[in-house]
Image (tube, rainbow, N blue to C red):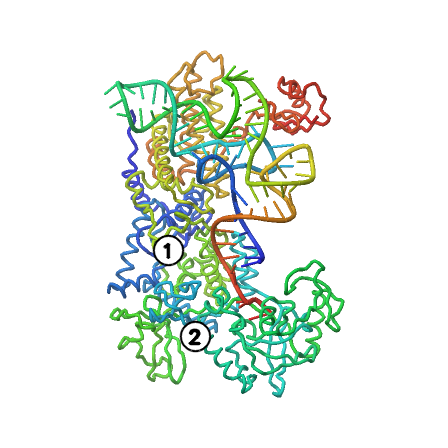
Amino acid sequence: MVEGYDAVAVERKWQERWAKEGTYQVELDDPRPKSYVLCMYPYPSGSAHQGHVRNYVFGDLNVRYRTMRGEAVLSPFGFDSFGLPAENAAIKTGIHPREFTDARIAELKESVLALGAVYDWRREVRSHDPSYIRWTQWLFLRLLEAGLAYQAEAPVNFCPGCQTVLANEQVLADGTCERSGDPVERRSLRQWFLRITAYADELLAGLDDLDWPERVKVMQRNWIGRSEGVELELPVVGADGVSVRVFTTRPDTAFGVTYAVLAPEHPLVDVLTTPEQREEVEALRREVARRSDVQRLSADAEGAGLDKRGVATGGFVRNPVTGGAVPVFVADYVLMAYGTGAVWAVPAEDQRDYDFAKVKGLPVVRTTAPPPDFVGEAYVGDGVKINSGFLDGMTVAEAKEAATEWIEREGVGRRVVNYRLRDWLVSRQRYWGCPIPVIHCPVCGPVGVPDAELPVLAPDDVEFLPTGESPLARHPTFSAVECPRCGGPARRETDTLDTFVDSSWYFLRFTDPWAIDEPFAPEAASTWMPVDQYIGGIEHAILHLLYARFFTRALSDLGIAPPEVREPFRRLFTQGMIRMDGTKMSKSKGNLIAPTAYFATVGADALRLFHLAAGPPGDDLDWTDQTEEVVAGWGRWLARVWRLALEAPTRDGATPVGAEAAHDRARAAGSSPEALALRRLTHQTIARVTDDLERWSYNTACAALRTLTNGCYHALAGEADPDGSSAGSTTTPAGDAGDTPERGAARGAALAEATDTLLLLLAPMAPHLAAEAWERRNGSHVHLEPWPVADPHLATAPTATLVVQVDGKVRDRLEVDSGIGEEEAIALARRSPRVVAALAGAEPSRIVARPPRLVNLVR
RNA sequence: GCCCGGGUGGCGAAACGGCAGACGCGGUGGACUCAAAAUCCAUUGCCCGCAAGGGCGUGCGGGUUCAAGUCCCGCCCCGGGCACCA
């Protein structure tokens, strides 16, 4: 009876050893080829949950695999440690957010260590650390100097219940606050923005070269929302020199314009509104101002009729293309923030315009002839232009071009490109975030805090009350400062930065977290960037990943990051979500299955294998009743590998140096059919697992390791049972009388090679067991061994199964030589009694031969 | 409404257009044991059949092909993203 496997003790031993020996620490001058593997740094919410585990297991596998492939892998870890939960906890319990956050970080870090995931912990970064705050603020000041940060008045979501501004993500689809349930209001406040729109085109074009999931790229393209069109002026009837500027992507529909619409906030509403209409227009504007954007956009779903959402101004504008005058309405379906905040309406070719026209009884004039079988209202497809003057007879594309040229020639408009993307609002009326390093002077205006005074740190002695402004604003001394420029009395900015700012450059800081007079040395960024493999959840497909791309480009343009670093993440993998009872597993849903529970029982390795093997890494994973059994199954398999490692012969002789030597020795030990079969399986498994790891097919890699283990056990049974009569020794050919010493030696060598190979292949997946078992057998450290290489002669099968079909139905299977020719394959196939029977004397009219796999005889 | 994914045994899942269900979980049987656990071995898509064997099977309906889970057309269902963006 061999010694049992003590997962808890072994895992602790190796975790300590990797830390103590700095196995996964890397330096800038490392001679090995460099790579950078990164998991999205987490918000510290306490002990790791299964989503973290899944993320870090994939990351750790990549780090360990690449290391065995001979690369110097940068694998850092940190914490996105600013954010609302800590501040909300402070409001509730009075515990300072820093104290709360540090405790959560300690918990998370402990569970990540217990998972056996390895990082260069010397590089740990925390967003709330003064040394990180300093450089976040420094970068903000550089953006400010470059005109990429600016202040503007903007409507924001405000929750009256919480007395605070909310992020868009905190407003539910029905326009209520996710926390209090109160309807969210819009308030206009002076806010800080980052000019991400200046990079809209670059961010769009840059997507083409990224090795990212197509679906994430599509989401970003949609989010940026580039559209080409024309801006043109519609002169206001009866007001000289005043005109309404509209944006359209369909200049070809000019002759179908039957009215125009302004957004309720549009500055020309007052000009156009007649005295008779004033009251109605004002009522609509008041109503709209009260609603949040979300409510406004979901008005349809709530059943609020379109007639309630738009009113006539009584004014008219002239269509410069046709010369005709059309009435102007105010309606909330037109958004001030997109295009020019005004549209010309073509009900025949736009469904929203059609719906509105229907309610208001406005005319509908088709300018594109729909196909004869067209059913529906607005027709947006291609066709021949009609009712359109000089455009008649053209296709939509031709008419677009002709109309645009006409508009430009006549000087009434020009081509423009519009984006859905808006500038990034980064002000937060919150305490637990990075203070915006700006001083407002009544004389000089907003002035950046001098670099030498960074970081600006929030004072600890504040009251955490939900009042709608940052707790910093009510601090007795924080905001009272002198203007750095003129020395006069001034006021310090009390808002903090969106936490997405922190996460927009942390991957750069990781390359050189020790830098004290710059955010990171350009040389370090140049060496490690871009991240070769970034891993995280699909929920960050737009926000974080877009902001980080913008930041990287901006810093590169400002000369802070190296010029060649234009994209932060070369390759991205988005892991699937973990669901339970059909919903996302999350703390707020209370359906967490804590990973830490497994560490004390089956061990981290078993949980790691479960996550790797459960299914394709990109697919969602359902946590069910069966899951416990499956995790336990991986624990049993690990114990099986352990017993094999202790029982199987070791490679005899001197210094064990890895698979290459094992391979040579096994070859030298001669051969026997069963030894050869095991060696073939071993090398096929190397090829298979290597290929699977490259393709992120971890579930099939795990299956291949299972198969190899089963093969080893069969060989082990033969070892214990030399006459070959064991039920397990299926590889022993019939008539094999007994085991000679040579055969035993060959099998022993093959088994030793197979077992050591299994441990090498397992090392990135179940690192603790692989390390311990390898050390017992070979005395060395498995994670410092080179990744095994498959012998191509052994990895390719010498024989193949020839499937013989008659009329496409399988009638027989024959073992044939892999190199069999077409003629011979057909001859063999026709000789098969079952095939003869199936043919029933008929002569095949056609024979399809694909040796060595298939022959199909067609009657 | 639009854009992506995805529907394969009791369950998780495999499968360059060429043996559907690898590998597991669960089940069944056996060995070991006084017994149980652990372990090892075998078996396990469905239907008919004592068996040999045969038939049916990848959401539904068509099509292409010697051959379709895989490619094409049209549907149904599930999941996700976007959704007054002019």
Q: Residues within 10 Å of mark 2 (few under 14, many from 20)?
A: some
Q: Does residue B25 sit above or below B86 in this rendering? A: above
Report the chain holding disc 2.
A
Residue A415 is situated, as x and y percent measured from the top left of the image, at 64, 72
> Hey, which quadrant is residue A502 in on the image?
bottom left
Identify the residue at horizontal 48%, vertical 52% (top origin): A572
Q: Does residue A25 sit above or below A133 in this rendering? A: above
Identify the residue at horizontal 38%, vertical 42% (top origin): A624
- In the image, B68 versus A471, the foreground residue is B68
Residue A736 seen from this side: yes
Residue A20 is situated, as x and y percent measured from the top left of the image, at 30, 46
> Hey, which quadrant is residue A780 in on the image?
top left
Q: Does residue A119 sit above or below A649 in this rendering? A: below
- Tell me the tag on residue A42: 1
Q: Amino acid at mark 1?
A: Pro
Q: Amino acid at mark 2?
A: Arg
Give the Cα distance between marks 2 and 1: 36 Å
* First along the sequence among labels 2 and 1: 1
SS label for mark 1: loop
In the image: residue A71, left or right of residue A814: left
Location of the C terminus of chain A by quadrant is top right
Observer-side mark, 2 or 1, equals: 2
